[in-house]
Image (cartoon, rainbow, N blue to C red):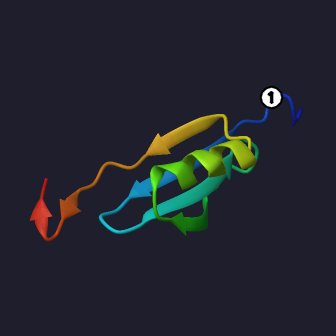
Amino acid sequence: MNHELRKKYLGIDWGEVRIGLALGDSETKIATPFKTVGNADEVAKAISEEEINIVIVGKPVRIMNYEL
C-alpha cells in the first residue's frame, strides 16, 4: 500500500480516571493498545507525535454500573 494513502487512527476510550488510547491504520486494519493518559493535553500530544489522521472516540455503554 502506498504510504501516502495510509491513514493512522487513534481510538480513544475516555474513562472517569484515565483515557485509554489505541493505534490502528488502514493497512493492517487492526487496533492495538497504545497507552493510557491522564488529560486532553496528553491526547493532543499523542495525536501530534503519532501523526494521526483520524480520531475515533468510543461511546460509553455504562458509567459506574448504570446503563446509558
- Residue 1 position within the rendered picture, expressed as x and y whole percent measured from the top left: 87, 37
- Residue 65 position within the rendered picture, expressed as x and y whole percent measured from the top left: 13, 71
Q: How many marks are shown on the rendered structure?
A: 1
Residue lying furthest right: 2
Residue lying furthest front: 41
- Residue 63 position within the rendered picture, expressed as x and y whole percent measured from the top left: 19, 63
Identity, as a three-letter code, of the amino acid under mark 1: Leu
Q: Is 40 situated above or below 6?
A: below
- Who's the residue at 46% across and 64% down the image? 38
- Who's the residue at 66% across and 34% down the image? 53
Q: What crowding class fits label 1: few (fewer than 14 Cα within 10 Å), some (14-19), or many (20 or more)? A: few
Residue 50 shows up from this direction: no
- Who's the residue at 58% across and 45% down the image? 44
Q: Is residue 58 left or right of residue 61?
A: right
Residue 2 in which image quadrant: top right
Closer to the camera in the image, 18 or 21: 18
Residue 51 shows up from this direction: yes
- Residue 57 position within the rendered picture, expressed as x and y whole percent measured from the top left: 43, 45
Residue lying furthest left: 66
Q: Is residue 65 left or right of residue 58?
A: left
Query: Disc 1 marks which residue?
Result: 5
SS for dot 1: loop
- Who's the residue at 73% across and 51% down the image? 28
Residue 54 in which image quadrant: top right
Closer to the camera in the image, 39 or 63: 39
